[in-house]
Image (spheres, helix red, strand yellow):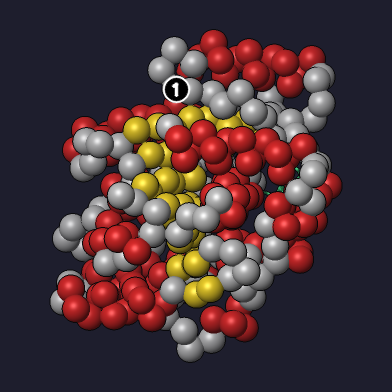
């Protein structure tokens, strides 16, 4: 059975895309069939996997799939469209996005079944994958609701910064609402602490703060992702950390977290 996981946070730049890329590509390296969905008009996940905007000219993207879903196209049409949108990278398969996706912000709220569009899109390919990972843009909007409605679990990356925990309670609340009204099976996979700068007092305080506030109900992964130049550099080469610098600490930590996601 396919496991669908969303990477979600209200804050930008916390490591959603980095986590989605490196966890998905590690799981692919374990011989699993993996699809990564770029649900962000910044399309950083695509770039991270070496797909530049030029590669997407004339191609079907998430924008077209949402448009088709919003226009209630037939299951046959949707199936054909989703399959035509899938792109191959050096590792995982990808459902790409472009800047056009953001133009749906204003239309999506007016559509019937607006929360279920992504779920319907993925229904046509989920039997072909062991894992589907959804990289969300920052925020708790309808795209986030779509991702959570389509998912089995959510991973919440939190930056190890004094303000990093801000918005985490909002995400938790959104997940509770989606679970109650749209997707009763939804679970939180866990919180990943990212961009950790050594064992400073500041990082220790943040870690303690998160554990005190959330650990009674949300798993906090023991493995943390240290701030490292290799992590920041690898997107520019269009490859995952496990291809770029497999021995660096963040690569190993992402690998161990990926195994937890697989065997949870
Ligand atoms: N552990 C790390 N060490 C160094 N740089 C990192 C690390 N994690 C992420 N980065 C860098 O920080 C920036 C933001 O990371 P990322 O794009 O993964 O965040 P995001 O939450 O997806 O952002 P957005 O909300 O804009 O989609 C990127 O330039 C990324 O390369
Ligand atoms: Mg991102």
Residue 22 on image: x %, y % = 62, 50
Question: Could you say where residue 78 lies in the image, as x and y percent from the top left?
Answer: 25, 75
Say if 88 sits above or below 174 in the image: below
Q: Is residue 140 visible?
A: yes
* Relative horizontal placement of residue 89, taking residue 122 as reference (left or right): right
Q: Residue furthest bottom?
A: 58
Whether 20 is drawn above or below 159: the answer is below
Q: Is residue 39 visible?
A: no
Can you tell which quarter of the image residue 132 is in?
bottom left
Judge from the rendering whether residue 196 lies leftward or rightward of residue 150; answer left or right: right
- The residue that appears at 76% across and 66% down in the rendered structure is 237
The residue indicated by pointer 1 is 218
Q: Residue at x 54, y 86 (%)?
A: 57
Q: How many marks?
A: 1
Q: Secondary structure at mark 1?
A: loop
Q: Is residue 95 left or right of residue 209?
A: left
User: Which quadrant of the figure contains the C terminus?
Assistant: top left
Is the residue marked 1 within 8 Å of ligand 1, measured from its CB?
no
Q: Residue furthest front?
A: 31
Q: Which residue does the image show at 60% across and 15% down from the upper left?
A: 209
How packed is label 1: few (under 14 Cα within 10 Å), some, or many (20 or more)?
A: some
Question: Residue, x 16% and y 76% (percent of image)?
Answer: 74
Location of residue 63 in the rendering, given as x and y in whole percent from the top left corner = 40, 72
The residue lying toward the viewer, choosing from 2 and 116, is: 2
Residue 179 position (above or below residue 115): above
- Residue 80 lies, in percent from the top left, at 29, 80
User: Left or right: 13 with respect to 77?
Assistant: right
Q: Quadrant of residue 250?
A: top right
């Amino acid at each position: 059975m396919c496991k669908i996981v969303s990477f979600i946070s209200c804050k930008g730049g916390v490591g959603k895309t980095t986590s989605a890329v490196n966890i998905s590509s590690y799981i692919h390296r374990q011989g699993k069939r993996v699809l990564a969905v770029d649900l962000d008009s910044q399309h950083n996940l695509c770039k991270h996997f070496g797909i530049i905007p030029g590669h997407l000219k004339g191609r079907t993207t998430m924008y077209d799939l949402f448009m088709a879903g919003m226009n209630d196209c037939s299951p046959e049409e949707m199936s054909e469209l989703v399959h035509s949108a899938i792109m191959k990278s050096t590792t995982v398969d990808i459902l790409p996005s472009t800047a056009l996706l953001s133009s749906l912000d204003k239309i999506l709220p007016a559509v019937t079944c607006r929360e279920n569009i992504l779920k319907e899109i993925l229904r046509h390919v989920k039997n072909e994958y062991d894992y589907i990972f959804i990289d969300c843009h920052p925020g708790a909007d309808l795209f986030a609701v779509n991702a959570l409605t389509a998912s089995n679990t959510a991973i919440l990356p939190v930056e190890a910064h004094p303000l990093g925990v801000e918005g985490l309670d909002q995400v938790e609340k959104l997940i509770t609402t989606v679970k109650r009204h749209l997707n009763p099976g939804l679970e939180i996979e866990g919180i990943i602490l990212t961009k950790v700068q050594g064992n400073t007092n500041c990082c220790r305080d943040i870690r303690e703060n998160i554990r005190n506030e959330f650990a009674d109900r949300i798993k906090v992964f023991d493995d943390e992702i240290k701030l490292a130049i290799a992590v920041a550099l690898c997107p520019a080469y269009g490859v995952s950390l496990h291809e770029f610098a497999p021995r660096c600490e963040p690569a190993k930590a992402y690998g161990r977290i990926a195994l937890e996601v697989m065997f949870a």
